Amino acid sequence: MGPQPNTHTTSQRFTPSEDDMSTTTASYSITGMTCAHCVAAVTEEVSRLDGVSAVEVDLNAGGDSRVTVTSTRPLAVEAIRAAVDEAGYTLAS
Ligand SMILES: [Cu+2]
């Protein structure tokens, strides 16, 4: 990780650590996703959350898709829910 030109304004600064043990991964189910556009929208919104370092979506059109979020600190499920909602989908769990 290095300085990024498009960082978010936040009151809480996080200092990236080289220690992988500081990384948190969590999976969520999302309903309503049907195609690559949906994946891109969800990935974009969730990636904007402070601390998120990776977002992986396992698309299951017609069912619940699975999104795996890797972050440098634990994320509140409500933050994920809000981001998914912003993208136009619903967090199922
Ligand atoms: Cu779509």
Image (spheres, helix red, strand yellow):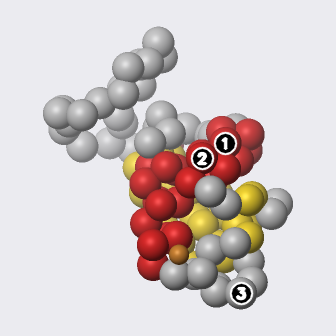
Which of the two discs, 2 and 3, labels the residue nearer the N terminus?
A: 3
Q: Is 77 situated left or right of 24 in this image?
A: right
**Residue neighbourhood size for the residue with mark 3, other residues' Cα within 10 Å, grouped as few (<14), some (14–19), many (≥20):** few
Would you say the residues marked 2 and 3 are in contact, meaning their CB atoms lie under 8 Å apart?
no
Q: Which residue is mark 2?
A: 86
- Cα distance, mark 3 to mark 1? 22 Å
* Above or below, comparing residue 30 to residue 58 in the picture: above
> Label 2 is placed on what type of residue?
Glu
> Label 3 is placed on what type of residue?
Gly
Q: Secondary structure at mark 2?
A: helix
| Mark 3 Cβ inside 8 Å of ligand 1 | no
Residue 86 coordinates in the image, percent (x, y): 60, 47
* Above or below, comparing residue 45 to residue 67 in the picture: above
Q: Which residue is mark 3?
A: 62
The structure residue drawn at horizontal position 48% and vertical position 34%, both measured from the top left corner, is 50
Image disc number at residue 82: 1
Assign the C terminus to one quadrant of the image.
bottom right
Residue 79 coordinates in the image, percent (x, y): 66, 39
Residue 24 coordinates in the image, percent (x, y): 57, 50
